[in-house]
Image: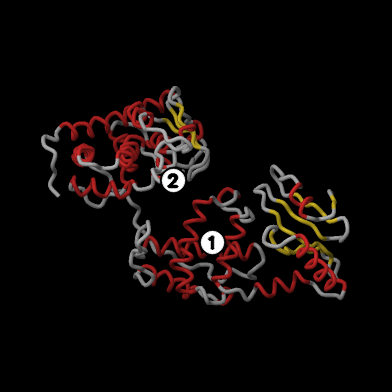
Amino acid sequence: MPTAKLNKRNVDAFPVPKDKQAVLWDSEIRGFGVRVLPSGLKTFIVQYRNIEGIKRRINLGRYGVITTEQARDLAKVKLGAVAGGEDPAQAIHQARSGMTVAQICDWYLVEARAGNILGRKNRPIKASSLSMDESRINTHIKPLIGNRMAKRLTIADVEQMQADVRDGKTAKARGTGRGGRPAGGPGVASRCLGTLQAILGHAKHKGLLAEHPTRGAKKLAVNKRTRRLSTAEIIALGKAMAYGERNGENPTALAVVRTLALTGYRREEAQSMKRAWVHAEGGFVSFPDTKTDAQVRSIGPEALKVVLSQPEIVGNPYVFPSLTGAGPYQAAPACFKRLCLWAGIEGATLHTLRHTFGSIAAELGFTELTIRAMLGHASQNVTQDYIHVDEALKLAVRKTSDEIARLLNEGAVSLRRPSLAA
């Protein structure tokens, strides 16, 4: 076990481990150390044995929030209490058992971002998922039941929270910044309940709660979105896109919409696609992380034309770069909404294009197994794991993409005048 006097120089110099956590122990105070995670997070700790001989470890504070000198003073206080027969870890546990829902949620976000809470497939929860969790917590969960004691929650309490979100009690008027208006509804309500149930489950697993207080609460049934564009609607969308090109619609937004239509990619996959991931010669995009982990996804020639024609901004790695920062372009949903208005298409979102891609593939005769691979769905069985980006899958993607491109182009050439009915 590495030891050194804990000071700023030694803590800064201690290397970040590649996989498991590492601890640098203080050479002067036994049991005082700093724990370093692969993420680079450094936390001061104290380790000791209580009066029953049970090994305990408690966190003193994160390095950067407190200094090494402050952590050293705290360690002396805690270890002095241990020498007097106290058990600081037990005291912390008892205090946590009285945590409110808001406090439990705050704990969850901190621990999850530090990689200390595992999600699907026993992996750290993704940053994108945590951002959605935080939004639900701040917008819905905290305002409704944030001040309630977590251990005293009942199934009726959380199901009522779900009902309140569904009925719009946490809806707000849209502000002046970017983003939509929190409006509630059954889908949001169901996801809020799922988020809270998961947080309470993690709290029990980590010892903050003796029992999961609301196990068995029922989530609202939500109709799965199956909306797809008909052949006529795809043609109308192509006409609207041609109209948008002639009338000042943002070309990057139009390119994102066209790419989504021609690939069936998820919105966040297309918008956040980086140039380094695109392998034009191989006809695929290598995503390092998606909703279902790292994936290699085929891309047809028609979609590649769109991707490769995008202007590059120095210092911005994205295929569809933001014009105002170093990130990706994010305003495609607003553009698609305008296109649908011009085309007379109702009830569609950018996700509808993904359903449309799969439906066109089915009409062309491709099997469900192939379509799942084309769309990058998570494997459901062993057989699907054998479908990679081979020539057969490339052919399926190309034929589907070509058919959608043909329909979009049919709409574009049908535009005889630079105006559409509003």
Mark 1, residue position:
198
Q: How far across and how far down the image is residue 104, in percent?
A: 58, 68
Judge whether 29 appears above or below 321 on screen. below
Type of amino acid at the residue the image marks with label 2:
Gly
* Residue nearest the observer in this picture, 29 or 353: 29
* Circle 2 crowding by C-alpha within 10 Å: few under 14, some 14–19, many from 20: few
Whether residue 69 is visible here, answered yes or no, is yes
Residue at image point 76% right, 56% down: 34
Amino acid type at image mark 1 = Ala
Q: CA distance from mark 1 to mark 2?
A: 35 Å
Crowd band around label 1 with a 10 angstrom C-alpha radius: few (<14), some (14–19), many (20+): some
Looking at the rendered image, the disc whose residue lies closer to the viewer, 1 or 2, is: 2
- Pinpoint residue 286: horizontal percent, then vertical percent: 49, 33
Which label sits on residue 325?
Answer: 2
Q: Is residue 185 visible?
A: no
Of the pair 236 and 185, the residue shown nearer to us: 236
> Residue 63, image x and y in percent?
70, 58
**For residue 112, which quarter of the picture?**
bottom right
Q: Secondary structure under badge 1?
A: helix
Toward which corner of the image does residue 16 lie, by quadrant?
top right
Q: Where is 104 relative to 285, above or below?
A: below
